[in-house]
């Protein structure tokens, strides 16, 4: 946490180290809650309404009622950005089940806690963003939809954390999780794309990926730029055989991939990545203002 991180907590704006929730919040006890990670540039939240809509859908999927309307949440985010010292930053917006008796039953939880933390976030070190990330395929699998649907952005990230621990141990930057069938799902906090013979490929979200907001934007930008796109199942071989590979996410933005399980990719950052990166930066400039 940086020293100037600030938090909006149930109506109060606080320094993050002063913001506290009860220890019996079921978000802490059981990971019972939902969240969004939102970037802002030039003091404007990027694609905010899409994030708020996904938050609402995640909450509905876990039968959690968000005590604030979308307009109220928008005002919270704007107020937080206004109070933050830097023009660019990252917000983690969370809704937890709230405080309740021990035992996982949510029915006696009093009131959901709404928390929004503004801070800086770097996913992978800047050097790696230039040189390209080194990936491994994790032994940890993404849960099937009848376990926990990957489209719910819940506070339960333990399998992603286990995959990240594996990546740390292997000395690489990021891990790719496969689904139960052994096909590519996504990274620990990012979606994955490959390029083969000029076509942009990514697994469909029913393969076990979050419906990434950056992913959707990259698909749109590619189509607008005349790049053929296809959402299709990908195996580990497809990662190894790719001409290019890259990761997308709010935190990650766009990160080119240099290697996967020690197989060097022929091109990093590749020509398709460069075009999309430029289009992505332009979109930020158009929607949030300013040159980047
Ligand atoms: N997958 C997972 C598991 C994530 O946590 C994230 C980050 N929100 C993403 C993908 C990327 O999604 P988005 O582009 O909406 O940030």
Image: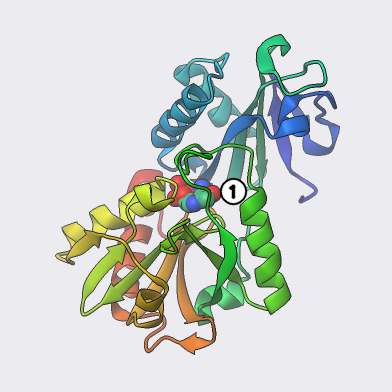
- Residue 195 lies in quadrant: bottom left
User: Which of 86 and 278 lies nearest the eye of the viewer?
Assistant: 278
**Going by the image, does 248 lie left or right of 252?**
left
- Residue 134 lies in quadrant: bottom right
Location of the C terminus (image quadrant): bottom left
Q: Circle 1: is it few (<14), some (14-19), or many (20+) Cα within 10 Å?
A: many
Q: How is the image coloured?
A: rainbow
**Going by the image, does 171 lie left or right of 49?**
right
- In this rendering, the answer to whether 260 lies above or below 246 is below
User: Which of 272 and 61 lies nearest the eye of the viewer?
Assistant: 61
Residue 288 locus on image (x, y percent): 41, 45
User: Which of 25 and 221 lies nearest the eye of the viewer?
Assistant: 25
- Residue 156 lies in quadrant: top right
Q: Residue at x 50, y 78 (%)?
A: 132
Q: Residue at x 38, y 53 (%)?
A: 207
Residue linked to disc 1: 89
Residue 43 locus on image (x, y percent): 52, 42
Residue 36 locus on image (x, y percent): 54, 38
Outermost residue, left side: 226
Q: Residue at x 48, y 82 (%)?
A: 258
Residue 144 locus on image (x, y percent): 48, 46
């Amino acid at each position: 946490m940086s020293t100037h991180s600030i938090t909006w907590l149930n109506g109060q704006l606080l320094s993050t180290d002063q913001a506290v929730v009860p220890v019996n919040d079921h978000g802490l006890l059981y990971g019972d809650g939902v969240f969004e990670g939102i970037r802002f540039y030039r003091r404007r939240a990027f694609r905010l309404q899409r994030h708020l809509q996904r938050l609402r859908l995640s909450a509905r999927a876990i039968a959690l009622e968000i005590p604030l309307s979308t307009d109220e949440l928008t005002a919270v985010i704007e107020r937080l950005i206004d109070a933050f010292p830097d023009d660019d930053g990252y917000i983690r917006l969370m809704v937890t089940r709230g405080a309740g008796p021990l035992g996982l039953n949510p029915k006696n939880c009093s009131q959901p806690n709404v928390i929004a933390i503004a801070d800086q976030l770097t996913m992978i070190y800047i050097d790696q963003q230039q040189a390209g990330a080194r990936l491994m395929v994790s032994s940890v699998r993404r849960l099937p939809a009848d376990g926990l649907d990957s489209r719910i952005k819940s506070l339960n990230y333990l399998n992603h954390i286990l995959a990240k621990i594996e990546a740390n141990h292997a000395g690489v930057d990021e891990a790719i999780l496969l689904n139960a069938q052994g096909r590519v799902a996504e990274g620990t906090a990012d979606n994955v794309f490959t390029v083969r013979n000029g076509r942009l490929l990514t697994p469909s979200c029913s393969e076990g990926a979050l419906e990434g907001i950056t992913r959707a934007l990259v698909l749109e930008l590619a189509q607008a730029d005349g790049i053929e796109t296809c959402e299709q199942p990908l195996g580990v071989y497809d990662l190894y055989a790719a001409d290019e590979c890259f990761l997308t996410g709010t935190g990650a933005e766009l990160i080119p991939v240099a290697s996967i399980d020690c197989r060097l990719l022929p091109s990093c950052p590749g020509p398709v990545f460069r075009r999309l990166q430029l289009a992505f930066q332009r979109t930020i400039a158009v929607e949030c203002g300013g040159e980047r």
